[in-house]
């Protein structure tokens, strides 16, 4: 088998309206997480996660954040020549204690990503990606609170362990772009 180098990309940008929804969204997630159990297995330890309900669009925190993320995904689609972003599922992960982490994994869909809702910029635990064409190379995504990062879902990635008791809350998602912008066809045919 020959391995061909094909470059990929990740998109990182601030969520418009983060400052408007942040505190209410954090309160809703904290309230909801009172009823959730820790995910704890060989590779993962996440204090609270609602992945089991990731396709339930009636959760209060999702009703609040989804319109903002949908608008963000439309902006990202436009920037890449895609159209019609579809959110497949969405969930939160709340890390609270030393050792909380999400080990190496991949996602379904075309793209996946993270909205950093509550994140200690002074002691970050950056999402790490493995280069698809050179699995000996890691890419550290240097994000800040309020950032959204989107990358191809086949990229192996992780969230390293917290080194202090320090709450980190993210909203994760899987999306796909159902189309290509019509104006892209002529350009693509001329490559």
Image (tube, rainbow, N blue to C red):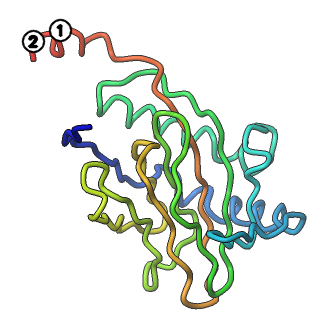
Asked whether disc 1 touches disc 2, contact meaning CB atoms under 8 Å apart, the reply is yes
Callout 1: helix, strand or loop?
A: helix
Left-right relation of 181 to 119: left
Query: Residue 77, percent across and down?
Result: 38, 31
- In this view of the protein, which residue sits in the foreground, 83 or 16? 83
The picture quadrant where one finds residue 131 is bottom left
Query: Residue 187, percent across and down?
Result: 15, 15
Query: Residue 58, percent across and down?
Result: 81, 39
Q: Furthest-left residue in view?
A: 190
Quadrant assignment for the N terminus: top left
- In this view of the protein, which residue sits in the foreground, 156 or 163? 156
Q: Furthest-bottom residue in view?
A: 164
- In this view of the protein, which residue sits in the foreground, 139 or 13? 139
Query: Residue 33, percent across and down?
Result: 81, 65
The picture quadrant where one finds residue 156 is bottom left
Q: Nearer the viewer, mark 1 or mark 2?
A: 2
Which mark, by number, is residue 109? none
Q: Is residue 137 above or below residue 70?
A: below
> Residue at 33% of width from left, 48% of height from top?
10
Q: CA distance from mark 1 to mark 2?
A: 6 Å
Quadrant assignment for the C terminus: top left
Left-right relation of 32 to 16: right
Q: Is residue 15 above or below residue 3?
A: below
Q: Can you identify the residue that label 2 sits on?
A: 190
Q: Furthest-front residue in view?
A: 1
Q: Can you identify the residue that label 1 sits on?
A: 186
Few, some or many residues within 10 Å of mark 2 (<14, 14–19, 20+): few
Callout 2: helix, strand or loop?
A: loop
- In this view of the protein, which residue sits in the foreground, 20 or 111? 111
Q: Is residue 177 above or below residue 102?
A: above
């Amino acid at each position: 088998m020959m391995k061909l180098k094909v470059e990929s990309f990740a998109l990182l940008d601030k969520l418009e309206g983060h400052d408007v929804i942040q505190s209410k969204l954090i309160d809703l997630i904290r309230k909801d997480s009172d009823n959730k159990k820790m995910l704890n297995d060989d590779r993962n330890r996440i204090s609270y996660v609602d992945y089991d309900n990731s396709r339930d669009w009636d959760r209060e925190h999702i009703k609040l954040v989804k319109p903002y993320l949908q608008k963000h995904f439309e902006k990202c689609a436009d920037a890449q020549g895609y159209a019609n972003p579809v959110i497949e599922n969405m969930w939160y992960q709340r890390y609270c204690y030393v050792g909380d982490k999400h080990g190496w994994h991949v996602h379904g869909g075309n793209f996946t990503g993270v909205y950093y809702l509550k994140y200690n910029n002074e002691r970050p635990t950056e999402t790490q990606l493995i280069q698809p064409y050179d699995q000996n190379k890691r890419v550290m995504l240097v994000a800040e609170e309020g950032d959204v990062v989107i990358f191809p879902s086949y990229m192996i990635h992780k969230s390293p362990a917290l080194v202090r008791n320090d709450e980190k809350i993210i909203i994760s998602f899987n999306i796909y772009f159902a189309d290509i912008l019509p104006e892209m066809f002529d350009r693509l045919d001329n490559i």
